[in-house]
Amino acid sequence: MKKINVVIYGATGSIGRSTLSIISKNLDKINIEGITCNKNILKLLKIAKSYNVKKIGFNEKTINNFNKFNLNKYEVFNDGGKFYSIISKKTDVIIFAASGLSSLDLLLKILKSGKIVGLANKECIITLGKKFISLSRKFKTKIIPLDSEHNSIYHLLSQNLGKYKSITITATGGPFLYYKKNKLRSVTPQQAIRHPVWNMGSKISIDSATMMNKALEIIEAKYLFNLKNNQINAIIHPQAIIHALINYENGISTAVLNKPDMRIPISSLFFGFNKYSNAYRGIELNNYYNFEFMPIDKNKFPAVELGYQVMKVGGLAPHIFNYLNEILVNLFIKKRIKFLDIVKLNEVNMDRFFGKNSNIANPKLNDIKNINNWIDNNLYLGN
Ligand code: NDP
Ligand code: MG
């Protein structure tokens, strides 16, 4: 049987780790053609050695003296601009799990590749907006979302059960679900990164703590599945067993129940929904007498409401929201702003932007780059 050839962008991260865990049990079926990282070159080389990977990529600008590493055995792509060349004619599947917006140009090329893409990175989807789906359709690139909620939606909608009214995604509520708002004023990056259910990279973990992650995921769902604004909503479900629910016009709802384990959505990419290669322990409802669902507290977690507003404004707003969040999360990690400022300053800076600039309904990539410059030069962090 021909092996599935895979390229993994962001192999050294949390999604990368889950992907490798699946591949390690399926070495007779999957071959890793290439892997990339940003600066974690030692980890990358370790993966390359274990999985006999020939092509590696990293960002040379972020690594001091990378020539000291013995790279003779590899074909090296040592600059983000060259990452796309790792993909070859024989590539079957691309895992796009590099974090943040810095890989936007790469994703734009991948959307034109006509390959199968397992897409974890939500930031790039939000910034590309409507262009995302139109490009992938035009070039027949098959996108399989890996974000657990969106992966559930993808499989549920593939069942073609008729007309649906709306889609609900769930949120665990993050590490601060039961904190009083007052206590949130002084939480540290270390506390925010410690997620109760998922083990993820630091940026997405902090997004979960502010619930910005859910705001971004609502917008992600809109663009991935071409939804109207009133067709997508979110609620809290701390057990994280139901990730998304489709509400049909006939009053029926469907959901997939599975443990919170990113290997499940990722393995559906390789083996299809019905053919997971590994037997994950299923759900015994006996162990879940306490399934809970609750509304999101808008006062404690204003990010989600802000996300809805941003989605309604459309145009540049989702990108600005997303871009500002990336900057503000970084400032929080560096302890330059407080936890509650992440969302507050996002709103303030967005208002300042729209006070001085008009919206653009269908922004081009150049518009996005100009806006980033404007934000970089005008960022307001309070007095
Ligand atoms: P991590 O921070 O754990 O990993 C990020 C990966 O991207 C690393 O391999 C990192 O390399 C690489 N990377 C970072 N910046 C760059 C860059 N400028 N150029 C090239 N590579 C880069 O993140 P996660 O794995 O948690 O998340 C990855 C993406 O998937 C995010 O967009 C996130 O929102 C999304 N996602 C993650 C989920 C999860 O469970 N983790 C769930 C749903 C979505 P290096 O190690 O060298 O820094
Ligand atoms: Mg998610």
Image (tube, rainbow, N blue to C red):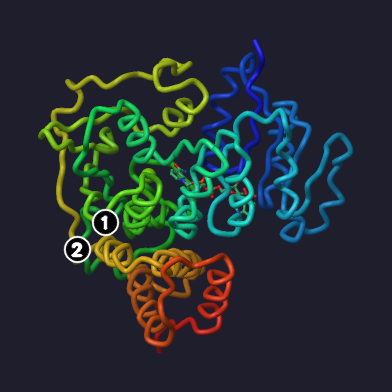
Instruction: Give the mark nearest the N terminus, 2 or 1.
Output: 1
Residue at position x 58%, y 48% in the image: 98
* Cβ at disc 2 under 8 Å from ligand 2: no
Quarter occupied by residue 50: top right
User: Where residue 197 appears, x then y in whole percent?
Assistant: 34, 40
Q: Callout 2, which amino acid?
A: Lys
Residue at position x 11%, y 33% in the image: 250
Residue at position x 54%, y 66% in the image: 364
The residue tagged with tag 2: helix, strand or loop? loop
Label ID, residue 298? 2
Q: Which residue is mark 1?
A: 229
Q: Callout 1, which amino acid?
A: Asn
Residue 300 in sight: yes
Count residues near mark 1 (Cα–Cα under 10 Å), then give few for <14, some for 14-19, many for 20+. Answer: some
The residue tagged with tag 1: helix, strand or loop? helix
Q: Is residue 148 above or below residue 380?
A: above
Residue 191 in sight: no
User: Where residue 20 appears, x then y in whole percent?
Assistant: 58, 30
Q: Mark 2, mark 1: which one is toward the viewer? A: 1
Quarter occupied by residue 155: top left
Quarter occupied by residue 219: bottom left
Total numbered labels placed on residues in the image: 2
Count residues near mark 2 (Cα–Cα under 10 Å), then give few for <14, some for 14-19, many for 20+. Answer: few
Label ID, residue 238? none
Who is closer to the viewer here, 247 or 186? Answer: 247
- Quadrant of the frame with the N terminus: top right
- Quadrant of the frame with the C terminus: bottom left
Left or right: 277 with respect to 312?
right
